[in-house]
Amino acid sequence: MAEEKTAGLVQREGMILENITTWDKTILREEFLRSLPAAVGHVPYQTSGNQFQFEAAGRCWRITLEPLTDLRIGLLRLPRHRVSFSFSGYSDEEIAAFMARCELYFRRGGG
């Protein structure tokens, strides 16, 4: 289950981050951390709490993980997190490819 939202520009720590996209995902933090390296192509990102960031050659992406209240369906409880993506210095095509890769690695099966 994922909900996607897109916003405009945001300025943080002197850097303008563009193309802010958020997903609301039913995922444990541990599952997210296990999938993250492959989802971002195994680049050497930095971690600070619930923020994961990669900077190189004047470009940057940042992923922020925010806990949400559990989704309850009867007796079933599913952990949820909001995952926010922000970019600076990437083309629309590069962002689309990055997001497609992340979606592939964070996709949840059902049936």
Image (cartoon, helix red, strand yellow):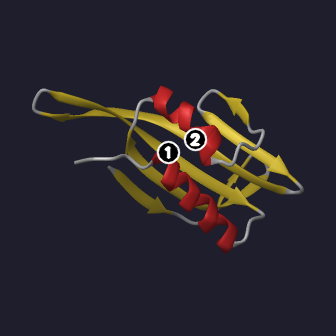
Looking at the image, which residue is at 59% across and 31% down?
50
Looking at the image, which residue is at 37% across and 46% down?
108
Q: Secondary structure at mark 1?
A: strand
Q: Which residue is mark 2?
A: 64
Disc 1 to disc 2, C-alpha distance = 6 Å
For this rendering, which residue is in front, 11 or 88?
A: 88
Neighbourhood count class around disc 1 (C-alpha, 10 Å): few under 14, some 14–19, many 20 upward: many
**Please, which residue is most extreme toward the left here?**
74
In the displayed structure, 47 sits above or below 38; it is above
In the displayed structure, 60 sits above or below 7; it is above
Residue 8, located in which quarter of the rendered image? Answer: bottom right
Residue 53 at x, y = what percent? 71, 42
Q: Which residue is mark 1?
A: 83
- Label total for image: 2
Neighbourhood count class around disc 2 (C-alpha, 10 Å): few under 14, some 14–19, many 20 upward: some
In the rendered structure, which disc, 1 or 2, sits on the residue that comes first in sequence?
Answer: 2
**Please, which residue is most extreme toward the right here?**
57
Residue 15 at x, y = what percent? 78, 53
Residue type for callout 1: Val
Residue 83 at x, y = what percent? 50, 45
Looking at the image, which residue is at 57% across and 56% down?
101
Looking at the image, which residue is at 49% across and 26% down?
30
In the displayed structure, 11 sits above or below 79; it is below
For this rendering, which residue is in front, 97 or 72?
A: 97
Residue 64 at x, y = what percent? 58, 41
**Please, which residue is most extreme toward the front here?**
111
Left-right relation of 79 to 34: left
Residue type for callout 2: Thr
In the displayed structure, 96 sits above or below 54; it is below
Q: Which mark is residue 69?
A: none
Q: Are marks 1 and 2 in contact (CB under 8 Å)?
A: yes
